[in-house]
Image (cartoon, grey):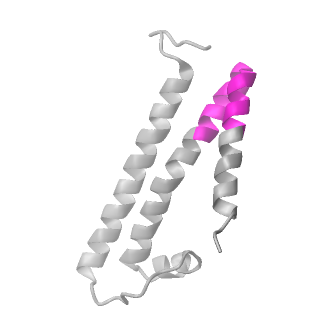
Amino acid sequence: MSLDVHGHRRIDRWITFILRSGMLLSMGIMILGLLLYALFPSQSSTVVSIQQIPNEIAKGNGQAILLVGILVLIATPLARILTAMAVFIIDRDLKFIALCTLVLIVLLVAVLVRPH
């Protein structure tokens, strides 16, 4: 376990940074999307698919920008797991490396397996 000068574990600092940054970034993106959507309400009210996001952002579609903010918010816990895993690899903590790997496998299966 790596401790900094204040006695905090290195992983705690990194995870706090990742979670706070992800939340603030997603909030900023969503506020921008809401502002654009409020300023230009005449845009299409159809649902934007993930494949359409780049084209819709290029058009200034607030709904697409809002969706990116939501995706960043969803991806933040995944970034937290990857960050924790990197710290555990550096610290050579095999038990927690295995645990992070298991969590990533469960997440991957949850994303890939679709109900009929």
Tell which of 84 and 5 is nearer to you: 84
Q: Residue 107 placed where, x, y %?
A: 64, 51
Report the magenta stretch's main SS.
helix
**From the viewer's perspective, is 86 left or right of 63?**
right
Instruction: Identify the residue at the far left of this view.
Output: 39
Q: Residue 46 placed where, x, y %?
A: 41, 87
Q: Which residues are magenta?
A: 81-101
Q: Is residue 38 above or below residue 70?
A: below
Q: Quadrant of the C terminus?
A: bottom right
Tell which of 114 and 23 is nearer to you: 114
Q: Residue at x 69, y 63 (%)?
A: 112
Q: Residue at x 64, y 57 (%)?
A: 110
Q: Quadrant of the N terminus?
A: top right
Q: Residue at x 45, y 40 (%)?
A: 19
Q: Residue 39 placed where, x, y %?
A: 24, 79
Find out whether residue 92 is within the magenta segment.
yes
